[in-house]
Structure formats: structure tokens, C-alpha cells
Amino acid sequence: MRVRLICHAVLAVAAVSMLVANPQNRVRQPLVLSSAAVPSRTFQAPSPALIAKDSGKRRHRPSWIWRVFGAALPDEGGCLSDVLPAGGRKPTVVLDRLDSLGFCFEGFRPQDRPVMRITAPDGTQAEWPAVHEFADVWGWTWTNEEILLVLPHPGAYRFEVTAAGTSTTTGVIDARPAARPDVEFSDVHEVSPGETVSAMVVGRRPGSPIFASLYGSQKPKRLRLVHDFAPVIADRWGEGVIKWTVTDEPEGDYGLLVETPQNDRPDACLRHNACSPFVVRR
């Protein structure tokens, strides 16, 4: 039985297949093939050519190879990592704060409905049913925003995957505190009365104040300050949450601004994720 595991994070273990962390907001540079002329050479295979017998092992094709030729990825759901053997303890997953996270396991039996149980450092547990990806592959995927529900604070989380006909697989997710200031805004572009816009702030000095403000637009194109939030004090991990719920504000364009060390730069919103625009509808 074999298992497929993808993690947009780095596996901190030696002499095992490594999975690579992929923060969602990191831009991947395309791979450019050189167009330099190469002298033509002719190679002749030995005669007779030897053909290896089919060992029954599955090929592990790298996901980046498809981008080399500008081709679309094969239809394999979100599972593009190497396949790992099922059962037993897996390498520790080292996850930077606010990184997305995904697991895919391969080799489940038809009657299996895998469940992942995650135990937090304080002992609390939560169970997450798997999503069927394709064939005998089931997986779990959490975006940057969703990962805060799974791993609410930095620390070592133990995971265990169980299914009726498959060996139990265990491992550890090491969620590291943020190494630099960052903000994860709720993924909303349009809100109505009663709905909430939030910002998860990380990478601050524990005990320091986090300032945020709400701005709105007026006609003609003018900016107005709607509300200054009371400072949120960063916890022992250097994190804090800012929330705003729509009440009686008029329709229009709004923006939530979190003060960062780079706020004096004109590109603070785009490059340093300091603000998030949205629309209020009634």
C-alpha cells in the first residue's frame, strides 16, 4: 500500500523524499529553456537493446515538467507530489506560519473513508474527513486562511490518518511562528450587513500594539476615514486578529488597512499585504 503526501511546506528530515513549502503568495518563476544551438550528434544504441521487465512500480513524474512546455497539468486533483509508502510514522512537516497545507494518500480500499485526527499542543483534537481526489487517492487541503482553523497557534501538532482497510499513518506538523510581519485577510470581495471582514496579523513583537483602520470612498473620488480600531496586543506568538462586522454603513468601496513597518511605501498594499479592498452591498 502506498501513500501520497503533498505539503506546501518543507519536510525537515534527511534521507527521505522531500516535500517543498509553497507559500501561496510566492510567485513561481517560469523555467526558460536555452535556445542556443547544440551540435548535432548521433548515438547508436547497443545491439541488441535490452528492455527492462515491468517491475510494477509506478513512475513519479515531477509536477514542474509540465510547465517547461507550457502544457496544462494532468488531471490528478491536487496531488502532484511523490508517493510515500502507507502506514507507520511519516517525516515531520515544517510549516511556516500562514502557509497552505495539503496531504494526499494513495492506496485506499474501496470501502475506506479516511479521517485525519489532528492533536494540538494543548491536547485538543479535531477530525477532518478526506476528500476523494481520484482513483484510490484521498486528500486534505487547507488554504492560507483555512489553515488558521486547523493550526490556530504555532506549535507541534500530531496527525493520525485512519481508515477501515488501511494501515494507520502518523506524523507531526511543526507550525513555526512567523519570521517576519505578515497579514492574512479574509478572502472576501463583497460583504453585506451582518458579515465580517477580518485580518490575521503575524510576525509582530509579543506584547506590541497592532493598529488598523477602515477607510471608505466618497464621490467624487475621495478617501474618508470610517473607523480606527482599538489597538490589538500581539500575543506570545506575536499574533493578533482584527475583525469588523458590517452594520449600517452605506454601500460602496471600502478598505481594511493594517499598519506595518512598510506603510510609508506607496507599494505597501501590493508588496507587503498591508490592506484589503472590498465592497459593501445591501
Image (spheres, rainbow, N blue to C red):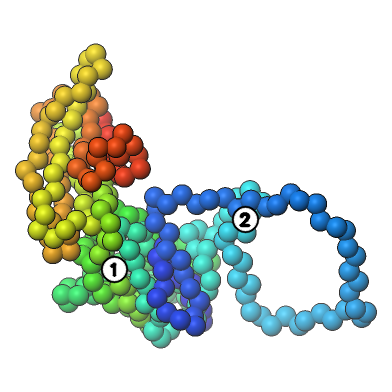
- The kind of secondary structure element at disc 1 is strand
Give the residue drawn at x 88%, y 63%: 41
Q: Going by the image, does 163 lie left or right of 279?
A: right
The disc at residue 175 is 1
Percent position (x, y) of residue 241?
16, 51
Mark 1 or 2 closer to N-term? Answer: 2
Spot the residue most to the right.
47
Compared with 182, 172 (above or below) is below
List the residue tagged with mark 2: 66
Give the residue drawn at x 22%, y 55%: 202
Name the residue type under label 1: Ala
Percent position (x, y) of residue 261?
23, 46
Q: Going by the image, does 69 lie left or right of 140?
A: right
- Front-most of 27 and 244? 27
Kindly report which numbered mark, 1 or 2, lies closer to the viewer in this rendering: 1
Which quadrant holds the C terminus?
top left
Name the residue type under label 2: Trp
Compared with 160, 267 (above or below) is above
Q: Going by the image, does 187 lie left or right of 38?
A: left
Percent position (x, y) of residue 199?
21, 47
C-alpha separation, residue under disc 1 versus residue under disc 2 = 31 Å
The disc at residue 121 is none
Give the residue drawn at x 80%, y 52%: 37
